[in-house]
Image (cartoon, helix red, strand yellow):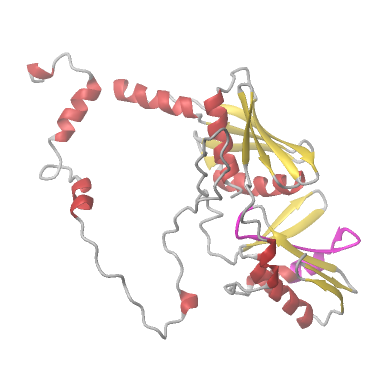
């Protein structure tokens, strides 16, 4: 090695060597390309095109509603997570369940779902005894159909019940009906249900601990979070869903905390060896009322969670519900 490099930290050597391999060397520095890039005219598609065939190829996370200022400080809103569930096309239909209760989650606004619910009732020849578009309820002689905003923005929950009991055959028929549709319209009186101005996740600090307050009933939160964690917490040695218990409304996860990721990065620069280790954490949901649930993160072992690690994990989990 060049004598001038002796005694220098490994990280500094790497930076020095790599800096000589940029634009005209082994590694092309794309930062310069972005800096020199020029804006081109937008692509124009034919007026007679079929708009149903076009979708976002690379979706960008949406920013949730701004949180109110506390003590003069405005907290930046969290972006919506691009989990496998969020990246699918709008109009998808999925089932949710807790205990004996079953319902559908449709990737469309209640404003779009409502007229299709009316069309479903007419196509089945059901006799409507009461209809309330503002509340999203269709009463028939056979069952009570309802639609309301789901926990995740832009989605809807659909139920078919009789006397508070899920009607399995009706739910299956609804599932097939919505799977066959391309839900794209957006005009309906049911749009007033959309809680656009509602802060869906409010963070509270109690001493050294953080918790998230969600404006939804606890069983609904558990069912949706169960589905989203199964999709998003499936990365070995990073984040994994180990157990879920509907009775206690809790989840056991294995997670690589923020402090451990930072420590592993610094250690790898010095030794070229990643020494990261995950930690088991229990995510617990507690009902604070009929329409409010508290989400907490508790260490499942002897190792405690720092306030920063607890907050970062809760932000990631709460982001799955946006």
Q: Is residue 106 above or below residue 319?
A: below
Left or right of 260, for residue 166: right
- Give the residue at x 17% y 43%: 27
> Outermost residue toward the front?
72
Report the quarter where the N terminus lies: top left
Residue at the (59%, 67%) spot, across then down: 91
Q: What is the x, y in percent for residue 140?
A: 87, 74
Depicted 48 relative to depicted 185: above or below: below
Find out whether residue 34 is within the magenta segment: no
* Residue nearest the viewer, comparing 179 with 60: 60
Residue 322 visible here = yes
When asked about the image quadrant of residue 4, the answer is top left
In the rendered image, residue 168 lying in the magenta stretch gets the answer: yes
Q: Nearer the viewer, residue 145 or 273?
A: 145
Quarter where residue 54 is shown = bottom left
Name the residue nearer the viewer: 254 or 28. Answer: 28
Q: Is residue 273 visible?
A: no
Q: Which residues are magenta?
A: 152-173
Q: Tell me residue 110's x, y (percent).
A: 67, 66
Relative side of 253 to 172, left or right: left
Q: Residue 60: image x %, image y %?
A: 44, 55
Determine whether 254 is above or below 193 in the image: above
Q: Residue at x 49, y 35 (%)?
A: 238
Give the farthest residue toward the bottom.
Answer: 48
Looking at the image, residue 1 sits to the left or right of residue 167; the answer is: left
Q: Is residue 34 above or below residue 263?
A: below
Q: Residue furthest left?
A: 3
Q: Is residue 176 left or right of residue 253?
A: right
> Residue 134: percent from the left, percent from the top?
75, 67
Number of marks present in the image shown: 0
**Residue shown at 66%/60% (left/top)?**
194
């Amino acid at each position: 090695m060049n004598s001038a490099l002796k005694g220098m930290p490994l990280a500094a050597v790497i930076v020095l060597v790599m800096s000589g391999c940029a634009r005209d060397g082994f590694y092309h520095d794309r930062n310069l390309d972005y800096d020199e890039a020029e804006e081109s005219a937008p692509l124009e598609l034919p007026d007679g095109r079929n708009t149903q065939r076009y979708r976002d190829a690379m979706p960008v996370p949406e920013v949730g509603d701004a949180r109110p200022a506390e003590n003069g400080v405005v907290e930046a809103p969290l972006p919506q997570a691009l989990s496998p569930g969020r990246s699918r096309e709008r109009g998808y239909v999925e089932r949710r369940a807790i205990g004996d209760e079953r319902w559908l989650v449709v990737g469309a606004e209640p404003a779009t779902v409502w007229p299709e619910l009316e069309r479903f009732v007419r196509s089945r020849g059901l006799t409507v005894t009461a209809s309330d578009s503002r509340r999203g309820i269709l009463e028939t002689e056979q069952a009570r159909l309802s639609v309301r905003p789901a926990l995740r923005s832009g989605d809807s929950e659909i139920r078919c019940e009789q006397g508070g009991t899920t009607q399995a055959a009706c739910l299956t028929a609804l599932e097939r009906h919505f799977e066959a549709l391309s839900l794209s319209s957006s005009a309906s009186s049911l749009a007033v249900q959309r809680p656009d101005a509602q802060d869906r996740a409010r963070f509270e600090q109690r001493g050294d601990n953080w918790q998230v307050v969600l404006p939804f009933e606890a069983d609904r939160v558990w069912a949706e979070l169960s589905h989203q964690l199964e999709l998003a917490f499936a990365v070995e040695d990073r984040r994994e869903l180990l157990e879920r218990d509907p009775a206690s409304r809790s989840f056991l996860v294995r997670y690589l905390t923020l402090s451990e990721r930072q420590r592993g990065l610094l250690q790898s620069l010095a030794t070229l060896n990643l020494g990261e280790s995950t930690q088991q954490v229990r995510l617990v949901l507690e009902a604070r009322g009929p329409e409010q649930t508290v989400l907490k993160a508790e260490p499942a072992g002897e190792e405690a969670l720092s306030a920063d690690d607890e907050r970062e994990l809760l932000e990631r989990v709460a982001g799955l519900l946006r």
